Amino acid sequence: MKPLIIPVFIPNQGCPNVCIFCNQKKITGMTDLPGRDDVRRVIEEGTKGDGSLFYRKKSDKKKENRPLFSLFSASLNKPQRNTCFKEVAFYGGSFTGLDLKYQEELLGEGKKAIDSGLIEGIRISTRPDYINERVLKTLKAYGVRTIELGVQSFSDRVLESSKRGHNSSCIFNACEIIRESGFNLGIQLMMGLPQDSEETLIDSAEKAIGIKPNFVRIYPVLVLKDTELEELYLKGEYKPLSMEETIRIGKVMVKGFYMAGIPVIRFGLQPTDTINPDKDVIAGPFHPSLRHIIDSELAFEKMKMVIEANELSGRQVSFSVPKKEISIFQGIKKENIGRLKEVFGLRGIHFVVMKNAETGFSLPVR
Ligand code: SF4
């Protein structure tokens, strides 16, 4: 069973400062603050049979909840026992930095929906320095089950350059008390912040794995209009990751999470009316199918490894893969097929649907 997330966006509220890369108003595409009635309406509409949502188009919701590829046995198709299946999510800004009365107004509406059986829990996103025992107690009382932390990096140098306003020990502390208090923990990481390097990125992924979150999201940095990062970029003082670097390093990070059994529920910002190169994306590794590219690269490596280990050069090979992963194994524009044929001189490659399997990998050889 896949989780249904019903999002309510609260743009750039509750933040003590503006991080160098952030234009939250543009990311969420709205500036009005939702109130109690909006939350009720979103929950009612989001839990209807058609799953239509108030603040998000149907097509976006479908993408959010699509099945996730899990080459290394990490998938939302196998949710952990403590994962809720229907949650209203207060995203954008820093929820626990909002005025307490406003927080309680929104949470109260969520709690009513929990008590009436419409949803099973509440999910919020916030900053590590806005988590403490008192905050967690309030969240618990209203039925919050999942906390997504905007960690971005575990490098103090990177955090400082990005004007995050907290250091890595604050992150470790927040993660620890969130886990100890029995919440589901999600970690958001960014790639390519100022002062980032391949080493800091891999190190951040390793540290995140060590914390054992329930899931992660990874966002390669895009230079957005009207941000401080845009100014630095235009002055030549900041250079975003190239697409090649993003795929090469992102692949290592994602593979690490898969191997640790940690679902990567998003890689790359979702394109919207404003998040696209014709609007607010000034520079950076933007691609609407970044996640598909990363997964296809991992699938290529997996097939390459199998062909090498079984000495299949010059042969005709069939791979048995779950139906929903066939396009991932074939690669964008079926590139993986051409690459493998070229590297190993294969006579042909075929994909057959693995029966009775959600995810997995096997190899019948003809
Ligand atoms: S804490 Fe999050 S929402 Fe607030 S300014 Fe920083 S990135 Fe934007």
Image: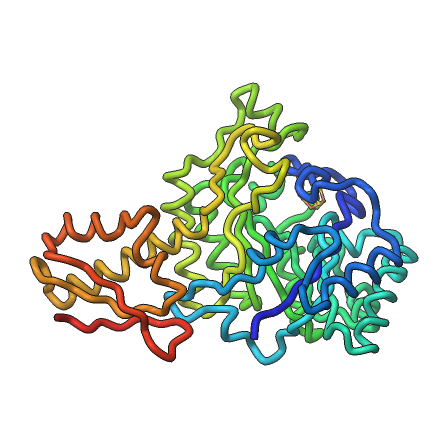
Residue 88 visible in the picture:
yes
Q: Quadrant of residue 169?
A: bottom right
Q: Nearer the viewer, residue 14 or 36?
A: 36
Identify the image quadrant of the C terminus: bottom left
Q: Nearer the viewer, residue 185 or 290?
A: 290
The residue at the far front in this view is 50
Colouring scheme, one of rainbow, by chain, secondary structure, one colour: rainbow
Q: Quadrant of residue 187?
A: bottom right
Rendered view: 228 above or below 271? above
Judge from the rendering whether residue 127 lies leftward or rightward of residue 365; answer left or right.
right
Rendered view: 107 above or below 202? below
Q: Quadrant of residue 276?
A: top right
The residue at the far left in this view is 314
Rendered view: 284 above or below 117? above
Judge from the rendering whether residue 142 lies leftward or rightward of residue 209; answer left or right.
right
Q: Position of residue 244 (x, y in %)?
A: 37, 39
Q: Position of residue 44 (x, y in %)?
A: 79, 65
The residue at the far top in this view is 235
Q: Position of residue 361 (x, y in %)?
A: 31, 71
Identify the image quadrant of the N terminus: bottom right
Which residue is drawn at the image coordinates 88% and 58% (left, top)?
Answer: 36
Q: Position of residue 337 (x, y in %)?
A: 23, 52
Which residue is drawn at the image coordinates 13% and 68% (left, top)?
Answer: 310
Residue 177 visible in the picture:
no
Which residue is drawn at the image coordinates 56% and 49% (left, top)?
Answer: 153
Which residue is drawn at the image coordinates 76% and 43% (left, top)?
Answer: 12
- Ligand 1 placement by image quarter: top right
Mark count: 0
